[in-house]
Image (tube, helix red, strand yellow):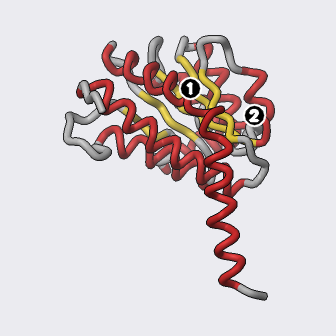
Amino acid sequence: MDLISRISQHFQDSAQVKLDAVEQLSAPIAEAAEAMVACLLANGKMLTCGNGGSAADAQHLAAELVGRFEMERQGLAAIALTTDSSILTAIANDYGFKAIFEKQVRSLGQSGDVLVAISTSGNSANVIEAIHAAHDNELRVVALTGRGGGEIAGLLRDADVHICVPSDRTARIQEVHLLTIHCLCDGIDCLLLGVEE
């Protein structure tokens, strides 16, 4: 096995998926950034969720919003629903793993907030339940998926935003999700701070 060639292929594949996705995803990413800014300006908040690598992405987004991305600004309201071990284990133990995000959305989500729901397959049962709860509580949903969007694609409403990576490989989908998160953070900062370039 030629490990260097294999690594080079990963770089090339990652770059190609991003280039293939740019036209398809630019408009929904911009729409999501605008929705998030409108939410924040109305004193709303972001709730983020996902599993595994998508949990890390959910936490990454919340951290960039509460802390900062590349420009200094006041912290923005965001909560990663993946981080409180007492809440997660209590809900999973008492209601099942499928309810770990849904119960939090019902408790914390208010009308006008935004749920950022991340699932590479679009079929994560606990993320799907969170989307149902978000709709019940009148939250707008920004869904980051891949593989055609899975079940989540069929759940989204007209006001929601679907950012679906055109790939079937989990690693490639996650790489584009990370780029998407950085684009969202940059877009939010530019809109809030009035950056022209």
Crowd around label 2: few <14 · some 14–19 · many ≥20 (10 Å) = many
Q: Quadrant of residue 192?
A: top left
Discs 2/1, front: 1
Q: Is residue 165 above or below residue 110?
A: below
Label located before the other in sequence (2 or 1):
1
Residue found 34% across the figure and 21% down from its top: 40
Quarter of the image that includes the C terminus: top left
* Amino acid type of the residue tagged 1 in the rendering: Ala
Q: Position of residue 86 (x, y in %)?
A: 48, 47
The answer to whether any part of residue 167 appears in the image is: yes
The secondary structure type at the circle numbered 2 is: helix
The answer to whether any part of residue 95 appears in the image is: no
Q: Position of residue 150 (x, y in %)?
A: 79, 34
The disc placed on residue 11 is none
130 left or right, relative to 65: right
Tag 2 near tag 1, CB within 8 Å: no
The secondary structure type at the circle numbered 1 is: helix
Quarter of the image that includes the N terminus: bottom right
Q: Position of residue 31 (x, y in %)?
A: 51, 22
Q: Quadrant of residue 4?
A: bottom right
The disc placed on residue 27 is 1
Residue that badge 2 annotates: 149
